[in-house]
Image (tube, grey):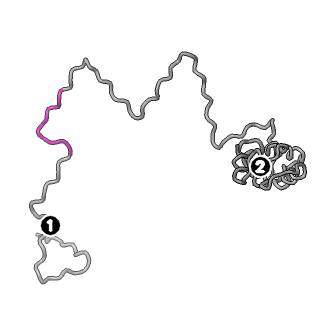
Amino acid sequence: MATEEISRTQGLNPSQQSSSLPDYPQMILEAIEALNEKEGSSMSSIAKHIDSTHSDLPASHSTLLSHHLNQMKQMGQILMLNNNYSKPDPNAPPKRGRGRPPKPKVPLPPGVVVSPPRPRGRPPKPKDLLAPPKPKPVSTGRPRGRPPKKAKTGTATAPPPPPGVKRGRGRPPKVLPSVGFQ
């Protein structure tokens, strides 16, 4: 399918391509196996090997090769390490995603129906239909809550000094009450 899309953009139909040419994933895997490099095979070495083994390659060979290499890398058919492609080790464990893996789910025995999850928040108090209705509290005449502050009616501060007398700087000295000695 991908080769058909690329070949259509290049102006070739799949029937116009030579039938003796194997598909690109097969050629790529053959090249990686034949080169058998320890660190993996680079894209240029894979291209040279395919070019040397197959003479009738299309003009868009490099585009098709890079497309199929990327596609095979995403599907996990080949690995890419340091810009080199290699076949994955069959004994290697499968690649994990990031983060902590989820706990394994225990399979339910047959015939058990799964209940829907609980709603969020505090559950409401149960309503007892047989209980008598609660009497409304008797009001004492006072409203609920803190009473408002009372407005000031008189001034409790000292009367202002007579006009014309200037006050000095700083705190005024303490006035001592006159104590009568006998």
Stretch in magenta:
135-145
Q: Residue furthest bottom?
A: 164
Q: Amino acid type of disc 2?
A: Met
Point out the image quarter for the N terminus: top right
Counting labels gives: 2
Kindly indicate whether the residue at mark 1 contacts the one at mark 2 (C-beta within 8 angstroms): no
Q: Amino acid type of disc 1?
A: Thr
- Residue nearest the observer in this picture, 74 or 104: 74
- Residue nearest the observer in this picture, 164 or 42: 42
What residue is drawn where x is 33% and y is 27%? 125
Is 143 covered by the magenta stretch?
A: yes
Residue, disc 2: 80
Give coordinates of residue 4: x percent, y percent. Answer: 71, 46
The numbered disc on residue 157 is: 1
Is 66 covered by the magenta stretch?
A: no
Q: Please name which of the two marks, 2 or 1, marks the residue nearer to the observer.
A: 2
Graded by Cα atoms within 10 Å as few (under 14), some (14 to 19) or many (20 or more), the crowding at tag 2 reads some
What residue is drawn where x is 20% and y is 44%? 145
Principal SS element in the magenta part?
loop
- Residue nearest the observer in this picture, 179 or 103: 103
